[in-house]
Image (cartoon, coloured by chain):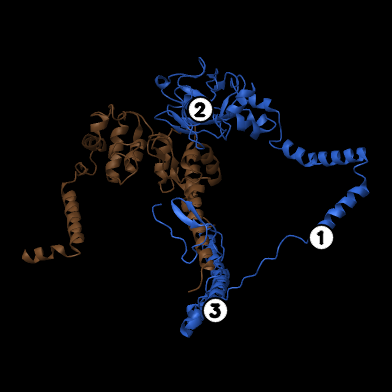
């Protein structure tokens, strides 16, 4: 103890103390943080709807009501369909972590099986759009050119011409769709999550939805011209030119004009 | 400025001025060129040698860059995929950059570090011509004017001035006349919509049934018979419409009695600010946002402006449903679409 006291004025002492404090905070958080309530693991072959209802009661009922009829805080889930659950829960948007302008995508809190069970339960409450099959969302089967025409008309104003995302009003935003899985893109069009409007099968037929998925998939390829800078257009390109490009020009000019030592 | 600025020592008879609380001499003497300061390389042979090695290294960078370019040309082909094109462009560009930057940087460094750095001042010669030349020029002008008789021949002078004055019209007229191609603004008052025109999907042209427009849907709409127009794109630019269905209980007002159908409303997509396509619809708030200047319209409230620079609501297209269940227009828009400027020409 005496040795420790003697070193308390050492110049590394504040850094060591800070590190210890951080470790302590982190450790306490790991121990005390609220765990995601985990429903009993589903026994294979058991009734998915019954298990799904248990998961629902444990995780969703606080906001959506005990029988998913909705409350002042959250909408009714009767008739939203399995596709809506698969999108909202499968991308981590639900359960919502904090109130805000919109629920952002985050780490998924359930296993694929649990998402399926939850979707089965919600689908049993009323008829709604179901999860699309693998073939319906296969980018290889879509027409990229037609997808571009449809994307330009229906999606590009919010999600950017190549799907990089963009701002909406009052803190909301249209997220980037470049990294979104084909199934989730399809479900988002079908169900219209959050601010996004619905694009039902009469508006965009299943084949047209697949064409749009093919177009988004094509945007994942690198650009032949070079770095895309997020495909955000004049903002990121302007920052690059004004800061890096003109900065280099000024630096070089100063070097040329400076006297040699 | 509390600090005292003392005048230059030894120049005590110079007139002083007072400004910002300080004392300055009335005129500063030209200090002349700074004393020549030898560079490190001028006095230290080792530094001189080092600079030479640096220049050689920069030229070697250039040589290397050229080799990279040539190698990339053969070894990294352009190929057919975006990946291979990006790779090829990257190496070609890197080689070209090193090749040219190496030469340029070496040349600048060479000139700065090794070539002599004696300051030279070249005095500028006076720009004023000699009195003799000036008098000669004035005399020549006078002689010319005298010879042409411009003072005496009035008609000639008038014709000459008129020709000069009118000639610029040959440049100005096409320039002004072709701005916007056409100055007939009346066509902005009417669009392709008329009574009974079916609302159709953009771009496929499929007519839309009211039953297909579910709540929360947005349809991007063109007139079904748009392709019959002489200039379909010009007509499309005016006639594009956004068709939205919301819960009828959410619909607080509309621009005309009976212009909607069971929560389905249709609004012009052309912003009333400067004419951008307004299409960022947030289905939870029923707000429609223009991406150009963030004008925001409340679709549930007759597309009133709730934010941004737009000055009036988006014009509403009156719609109804025909016997077969298709959505059709009741009439054209009741006011000009697009920027408010045209509104004033009514």
Which residue bears the numbered disc 1?
B133
Q: Chain of mark 1?
A: B
Secondary element type, mark 1:
helix
Give a yes or no on whether discs 1 and 3 share a subunit. Answer: yes
Q: Which chain is brown?
A: A
Q: Is residue A23 in view?
A: yes
Secondary element type, mark 2? strand
A70 up-or-down from A12: above or below: above
Q: Disc 1 or disc 2, which is closer to the eye? A: 1
Label 2: how many Cα within 10 Å (few below 14, some 14–19, many 20+): many
Nearer to us in this view, B1 or B116: B1
Disc number placed over residue B114 in the picture, else none: 3
How packed is label 3: few (under 14 Cα within 10 Å), some, or many (20 or more)? some
Residue marked by disc 2: B243
Of residues A28 and A106, the one nearer the viewer is A28
Label 3 marks which chain's residue?
A: B
What secondary structure is marked by label 3? loop
Viewer-nearest of discs 3 and 2: 3
In the displayed structure, A252 sits above or below B185; it is below
Q: Is residue A228 above or below residue B329?
A: below
Is A117 positioned to the left or the right of B288 in the image?
left
Chain letter, blue in picture: B
> Between marks 1 and 3, how big is the CA–CA gap?
46 Å
Q: Residue lying furthest bottom in this view?
A: B45
Percent x, y for residue A166?
Answer: 45, 42
The chain ID associated with circle 2 is B
| Farthest-out residue, front | B13
Q: CA distance from mark 1 to mark 2?
A: 80 Å
Q: Quadrant of residue A34?
A: top left
Label 1: how many Cα within 10 Å (few below 14, some 14–19, many 20+) = few
């Amino acid at each position: 103890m005496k040795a420790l006291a003697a070193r308390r004025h050492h110049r590394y002492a504040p850094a060591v103390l800070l590190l210890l404090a951080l470790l302590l905070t982190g450790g306490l958080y790991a121990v005390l943080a609220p765990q995601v309530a985990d429903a009993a693991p589903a026994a294979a072959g058991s009734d998915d709807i019954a298990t799904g209802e248990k998961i629902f009661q444990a995780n969703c009922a606080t906001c959506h009501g005990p029988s998913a009829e909705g409350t002042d805080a959250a909408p009714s889930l009767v008739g939203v369909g399995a596709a809506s659950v698969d999108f909202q829960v499968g991308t981590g948007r639900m359960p919502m972590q904090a109130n805000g302008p919109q629920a952002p995508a985050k780490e998924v809190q359930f296993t694929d099986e649990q998402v399926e069970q939850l979707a089965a339960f919600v689908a049993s409450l009323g008829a709604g759009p179901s999860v699309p099959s693998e073939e319906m969302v296969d980018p290889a089967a879509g027409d990229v050119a037609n997808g571009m025409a449809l994307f330009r008309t229906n999606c590009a104003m919010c999600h950017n011409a190549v799907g990089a995302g963009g701002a909406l009003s009052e803190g909301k935003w249209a997220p980037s769709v470049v990294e979104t899985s084909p199934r989730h893109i399809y479900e988002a069009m079908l169900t219209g999550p959050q601010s996004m409007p619905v694009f039902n099968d009469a508006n965009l037929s299943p084949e047209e939805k697949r064409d749009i998925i093919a177009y988004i998939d094509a945007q994942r390829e690198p650009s032949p011209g070079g770095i895309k800078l997020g495909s955000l257009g004049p903002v990121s390109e302007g920052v690059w030119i004004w800061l890096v490009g003109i900065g280099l020009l000024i630096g070089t000019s100063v070097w040329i004009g400076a006297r040699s030592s | 400025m509390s600090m005292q600025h003392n005048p230059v020592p030894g120049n005590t008879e110079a007139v002083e001025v007072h400004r910002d609380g300080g004392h300055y001499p009335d005129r500063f003497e030209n200090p002349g060129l700074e004393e020549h300061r030898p560079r490190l390389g001028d006095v230290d042979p080792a530094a001189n040698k080092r600079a030479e090695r640096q220049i050689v290294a920069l030229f070697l960078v250039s040589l290397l860059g050229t080799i990279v370019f040539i190698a990339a040309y053969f070894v990294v082909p352009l190929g057919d995929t975006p990946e291979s094109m990006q790779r090829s462009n990257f190496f070609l560009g890197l080689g070209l950059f090193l090749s040219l930057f190496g030469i340029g940087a070496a040349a600048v460094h060479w000139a700065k570090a090794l070539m002599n750095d004696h300051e030279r001042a070249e005095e500028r010669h006076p720009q004023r011509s000699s009195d003799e030349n000036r008098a000669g020029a004035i005399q020549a002008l006078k002689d010319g004017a005298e010879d042409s008789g411009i003072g005496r021949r009035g008609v000639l002078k008038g014709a000459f001035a008129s020709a000069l004055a009118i000639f610029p019209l040959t440049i100005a007229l096409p320039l002004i006349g072709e701005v916007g191609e056409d100055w007939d603004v009346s066509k902005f008052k009417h669009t392709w919509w008329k009574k009974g025109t079916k609302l159709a999907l953009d771009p496929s042209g499929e007519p839309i049934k009211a039953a297909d427009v579910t709540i929360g849907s947005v349809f991007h709409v063109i007139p079904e018979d748009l392709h019959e127009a002489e200039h379909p794109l010009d007509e499309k630019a005016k006639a594009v419409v956004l068709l939205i269905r919301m819960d009828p209980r959410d619909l607080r007002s509309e621009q005309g009695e009976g212009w909607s159908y069971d929560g389905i409303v249709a609004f012009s997509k052309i912003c009333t600010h400067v004419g951008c396509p307004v299409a960022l619809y947030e289905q939870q708030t029923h707000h429609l946002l223009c991406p150009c200047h963030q004008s925001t319209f409340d679709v549930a409230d007759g597309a009133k402006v709730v934010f941004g620079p737009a000055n009036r609501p988006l014009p509403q297209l009156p719609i109804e449903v025909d016997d077969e269940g298709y959505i059709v227009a009741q009439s054209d828009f009741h006011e000009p679409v697009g920027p408010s400027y045209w509104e004033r020409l009514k």
